[in-house]
Image (cartoon, rainbow, N blue to C red):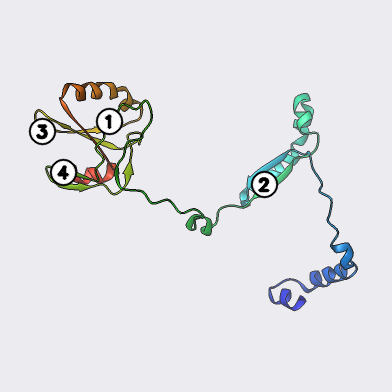
Amino acid sequence: MCDFFVSCGYPLEVLDDACNRVSKISRTDALIPRPEQSSQRTKLIMTYHPHNLVARKIVLNNLSILQADPDAREVFDEPPLVVYRRAKNIRDMLVRSRISASHDSGTRPCRRPRCKTCTHVSQSSEINTPRGVFTIADSFTCTSRNLIYMLLSVRDVTWYILVKLAAIWRHGLANICAMCKTGFINPSLYIFALLATKAVLY
């Protein structure tokens, strides 16, 4: 076993010292579970980075300032325990433990009980525009944000492009529903991605 660790680059002195300490422990003693030690010390949890190592020295050097305050002394009666969490590596960024569920492309109603837009949503994955047919590649609902909505007028067959910007869209939703009831707007509400729509419009 020592030869394996030597080939990995571990110092021979450290390996010899570890082997001597392990040889003095019997198998029975090694299998005895250690009692858990609960610590009440305040923990300072940081993501491990070489620049964060200085934070531990700063906290310990200025601990007297915290202990001088009567209120902070109750929290920091002992030096805080500095704990480092592992930073994200390339594997964490590229590999996902959960695969996103497949969804149908197109516009779908949100099905909220008080939503007044679901009845006017056209559940279609294609939009017929003056410049051709636009296919919706993703799935959206009437609660999606930062998108572009398209309304079709019945009277003059005009395409209306509306940018949804959170509260602005919700504030004007009542007016749009009123226009749908009067027949000025066809009950067809299309939702499609912002970048893709710019490519069609311009």
Residue identifier under label 4: 128
Q: Position of residue 50 (x, y in %)?
A: 62, 52
How far is the residue under mark 3 from the one under mark 1? Answer: 20 Å
Residue identifier under label 2: 54
* Quarter of the C terminus within the rendering: top left
Residue 119's tag is 1
**Quick one: label 2, few (<14), some, or many (20+) residues within 10 Å?**
few
Q: Nearer the viewer, residue 88 or 99?
A: 99
How far is the residue under mark 2 from the one under mark 1? Answer: 59 Å
How far is the residue under mark 3 from the one under mark 2? Answer: 67 Å
How far is the residue under mark 4 from the one under mark 1? Answer: 20 Å
How far is the residue under mark 4 from the one under mark 3? Answer: 12 Å
At x 37%, y 25%, the residue is 114
Which comes before the other along the chain, label 2 or label 4? 2
Residue identifier under label 3: 157
Q: Nearer the viewer, residue 162 or 4?
A: 162
26 left or right, relative to 169: right
